[in-house]
Image (cartoon, helix red, strand yellow):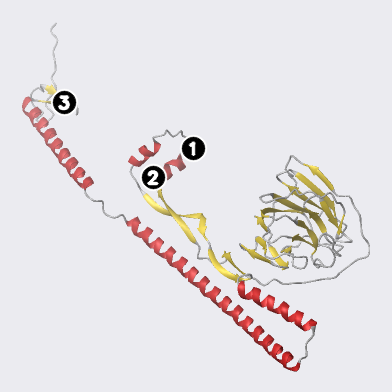
Amino acid sequence: MATITVKQPCAKCNKGGGVTTCNGCRQTYCTKHFVEHRLELSQQMDGINRDHDVLREDLLKEIPKHSLFLRIDTWEQEAISKIHLAAETARNDLQQLLNRTKNDLKLSIEKMTGELHSSQQTDDYTENELKQWMEQLKEFRKKLDSPLSTMTIINDDEIKSSIHLIRICDKQHQQLRQRSSTPTIRTPDYRTQHAKESIHCFIEKQQRPSTPTIRTCDHRTNTTKDSMMEKQLRSSTPTIRSSDHRTNSIKDSITEKFNEIDGKAILSEDNLVVTCCLASILTQPIIYGLNQYSSGKHQIRFRIEKMGDLRLFFGIIRSLENISRSGQAQNNNNNSLYGWWDLNETIINGKMQSSKYRNIVTTGDEITLVLDCDNKQIQLLHHRTKRVALCSIDPEKCPFPWKIVIRLQSAGDCIRILQ
């Protein structure tokens, strides 16, 4: 039998038999409408070429300023204004402190001038008055030549006008990273590829790096001397051992700061750094911690920013007592004083218990003072050599609460509390 071929009708006129099929839309057309269909495609192609040419011309033109540039400029001006205001305030405060120091010095010198004239006219003076006047002149000269000895600049974290840094972030790329749960390997040309993606940017604040506000501070140290003494002296043998492990039982360090100073030293960086200004047997600074310890186990980590030839002391004392300056620098009359001079020489009840002198601690070292109130002992960990010194505390001689105490011996000695 003969095979009957059924032809598809034209997609336009639906008449007659279609003679050809378009490979794009898969429609069948007659001859007339196929030509029209190709003409429509040609017109669409012309429109695409026109849009393409316009886009290329626009790309060559100068891109209009993005609105985010205005936000960046605004942030920059506000940040500069805050810095200028903080700097001007600090300058004014510093000038007021300098003027106050100078005025106080003028009053002291005028008073001394009257005493000198009166004593000279009446011929009423001895070696004692002469010595006293010479000491006063030296002190006045020192204040005049070094008016900044009690002044420093600190980071004022209490002010809420800190300047947060900003950065540009692609929100589309950030969303893709958040959705993706599997890690991706980025090839070396990742940045080039990423630059070609569509950019949807926004400005966000970086909370971690911020510019601190500074202010000047006139640090007047309080000198307190206490002569509390007890008759009994308890002797115990200190232990020094090597340790290659980290003490897991130590609790997280609390926020400790330097507080009271007896001697010539200045505090800086929110009382986390102490620096010795002048050192002699009578002026070697003794620095006490802010906190009091009665229970638990606590650690305070220090870094030796700078150290001279003489050793440093780290230890504790009862909170109601301060170190007496009578006696030698390494021996004191305070029965509640415990600690170490450079790790090897232990102080128990204010007295030295060992005499193996050898410098271990040096500039750049980090040490941790551990206060184990529950077990009534203290430890000193030297991280570079991994040495640990132990010392038991007699609660009758050093009752709770305790406070930390540090002593510097050389001008320029500097210690930082690490938070």
Q: Which residue is mark 2?
A: 172
Which secondary structure lies at badge 3?
A: loop
Residue 372 can be seen, yes or no: no
Q: Residue furthest left?
A: 32
Q: Are marks 3 and 2 in contact (CB under 8 Å)?
A: no
Residue 17: where, in percent of width, then height?
9, 22
Identify the amino acid type marked 3.
Cys
> Outermost residue toward the bottom?
122
Residue 334 in sight here: yes
The residue drawn where x is 8% and y is 29% is 35
Observer-nearest residue: 278 or 37? 278
Q: Identify the residue at horizontal 57%, vertical 76% (top origin).
A: 98
Residue 216 pos. (x, y %): 57, 70
Q: Amino acid at mark 2?
A: Gln
Which residue is at a point 71% across and 89% down the rendered structure image? 115
In this view, the mark in front (3 or 2): 2
Residue 62 lies, in percent from the top left, at 24, 51
| Spatial CA span between label 1 and label 3 | 45 Å
Q: Rounded to the nearest whole Å, what is the CA distance between mark 1 and mark 2?
A: 16 Å
Contact check, label 1 and label 3, Cβ < 8 Å? no
- Residue matched to label 3: 22
Circle 1 sits in a helix, a strand or a loop, which is it? loop
* Label placed on residue 181: 1
Mark 3 neighbour class, 10 Å CA radius: few under 14, some 14 to 19, many 20 or more: few
Instruction: Residue 256: give its label.
Output: none
Residues at marks 3 and 2, CA–CA distance in whole angstroms: 39 Å
The quadrant in which residue 273 appears is bottom right
The answer to which of 322 and 297 lies nearer the viewer is: 322
| Tag 1: amino acid | Ser
